[in-house]
Image (cartoon, rainbow, N blue to C red):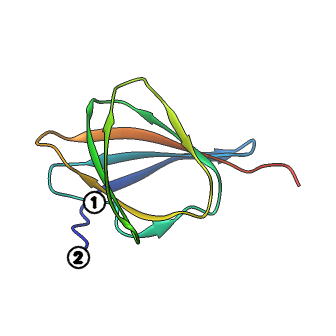
Amino acid sequence: MPAMGATATPLGDEHGFRLTEWRLPPSTSTGWHVHELPYTVVPLTDGLMRIETPDGWIDFPIEAGAPYSRPAGVEHDVHNGGDTEIRFIEVEARLPS
């Protein structure tokens, strides 16, 4: 059951990169989605992401300034598992063909 309520603000889409700022207040989520591009997330706040996948839940603590990367193609819904807003920049990379 999707919580939704997260806010996505496009920051740019040029030079092979798509940048989006995400804000997830407590008890919100991004909604189910699949990334068509590989991506890196740069957290702007500390917090707890609860990531829902077709196989179950993963608790994923984040730390401001500590980036992580994921491949394209994974279906998921990111939930704020804490009691403060989570903010991060998502950088999707178009790889050369």
- Dot 2 falls on a residue whose secondary structure is loop
Q: Position of residue 23 (x, y in %)?
A: 30, 46
- Of residues 68 and 88, the one drawn nearer to the viewer in this rendering: 68
- Extreme residue in the top direction: 65
Q: What kind of residue is marked 2?
A: Met
Q: Position of residue 69 (x, y in %)?
A: 56, 40
Q: Are dots 1 and 2 in contact, CB under 8 Å?
A: no
Q: Is residue 56 left or right of residue 15?
A: left
Q: What kind of residue is marked 1?
A: Ser
- Extreme residue in the right direction: 97
Q: Which residue is mark 1?
A: 29
Query: Could you give the CA–CA distance between mark 1 and mark 2, rounded to whole angstroms?
Result: 10 Å
Q: Position of residue 71 (x, y in %)?
A: 62, 52
What residue sits 75% from the left and 41% below the top? 15
Q: Comparing marks 1 and 2, which lies closer to the viewer?
A: 2
Q: Which residue is mark 2?
A: 1
Quarter of the rendering occupied by the C terminus: bottom right
- Badge 2: residue crowd in 10 Å (few <14, some 14–19, many ≥20): few
- Of residues 77 and 18, the one drawn nearer to the viewer in this rendering: 77
